[in-house]
Image (spheres, coloured by chain):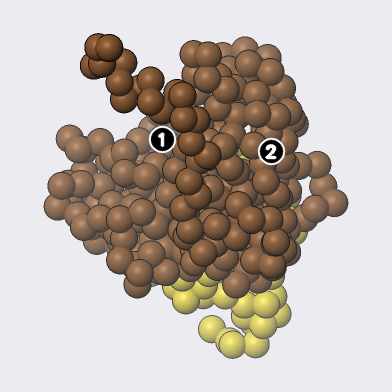
Amino acid sequence: MNTTPPDTSSQPVIEVNNLVTYYGDQKILDDVSLSVAPGEIMVIMGGSGSGKSTLLRYLLGLHRADAGDIRLFGKNIDTLSSHEWMEIRKKIGVSFQGGALFNSMTVGENVRMPLREHTSLDENTIKIMSRMKLEVVNLAGYEHLMPAQLSGGMIKRAALARAIVMDPGILFFDEPSAGLDPVVAADLDNLILRIRDAMPVSIVVVTHELQSAFKIADRITVLDRGRILMVGSVEEVRHSDNPRIRNLLTRTSEDEPVDVDGYLQRLTEGAMRF
Amino acid sequence: MTFPVEDRQGFSVVMLNGEIDLNNSPDARKVILNSLKKMKHVMVDLSSVEYIDSSGVASLVEGFQYARTNDLEFGLIGVSEAAMSVLRLARLDQVFTIYSSLDERLEHGS
């Protein structure tokens, strides 16, 4: 359970206002609005196809909104110059689902890379900083190994060390527990909480793992078919009587109503001759 | 930005203050290492530090290692809660010699 309350009185670090996005003609996110306070852990939860990974990609500035806007540190990211965006980007850490480590670099080189790319710090300082972060994620002494020599949990932790090496103000996690056994996943959850309690960082976690979400979240945003079903505390989500949230919590799949004509046409198109 | 250094009762006291981050930690590093080159006993006062990032902490680590290598004294005094939480994250609170104040250090004698 979370220990330090977020600072909800200050300006949000992340604001999403009426975000609408499309892939081709298909609307993926529909009027999504949320905010994340300084020091807050916001979990974005939803089933497959809910739009949570798409929302993360927009928060990372990988796509431009079709409507609405996203503000990071008070700035609309769609209106920033490339220099301004780079300054914002330095304050963002991302822990990708698969780690996204560079396989040709050692663990230490991976962790040091953002410092070498974005700072002019002394090499000694860079080495100490990266080793400190490897200590934080319990990978001290592994800096000379290659990513291929690490377990799944170690890759996640190395990726986390790289994500926090610049002391970001916002930290994004994409499915941190995916593919990990329950004990390793619980360790990673504890690590996320420790980092938030020690650093002035707001954290956004995209996950479909209920246990992890309930353990680390200050608030949870539940996405469903591209729309927000609710934003609330862990207890509010747990006790929601919204049937789609209940289905998500009880892992019950919900069949779409069948469009008989459309269904038959898909099955029989070009196959039937009368 | 430069950080003041005060000579007090045989100690060089480096006064860090405000927010120590990527922008000014190289200055902090320079002041700390210069003090260690001039004096045998150096304390870094963190009581006015509102925030210190890991580049600032790395400067403290480097100073501490330099002191150990050269048989000098290096300690931290008045560590603010903000600074202590960063030290704790990497368990450096168990590594550095930490005093509440210079007076506490003086009570320990030479």
Relative image position of residue A148 (x, y in whole percent): 15, 47
Disc 1 element: helix
Pointer 1 chain: A
In the rendered view, tell whether residue A152 sits above or below residue B106.
above
Q: CA distance from mark 2 to mark 1?
A: 22 Å
Disc 2 element: strand
- For the colour yellow, the matching chain is B
- For the colour brown, the matching chain is A
Nearer to us of marks 2 and 1 is 2
Residue at image location 64% in from the left, 66% down from the top: A238
Residue at image location 42% in from the left, 36% down from the top: A115
> Residue pushed farthest front?
A274
Relative image position of residue B43 (x, y in whole percent): 59, 66
Which residue lies under the disc numbered 2? A14
Q: Is disc 1 surrounded by few (<14), some (14 to 19) or many (20+) residues within 10 Å? A: some
Which residue lies under the disc numbered 1? A114
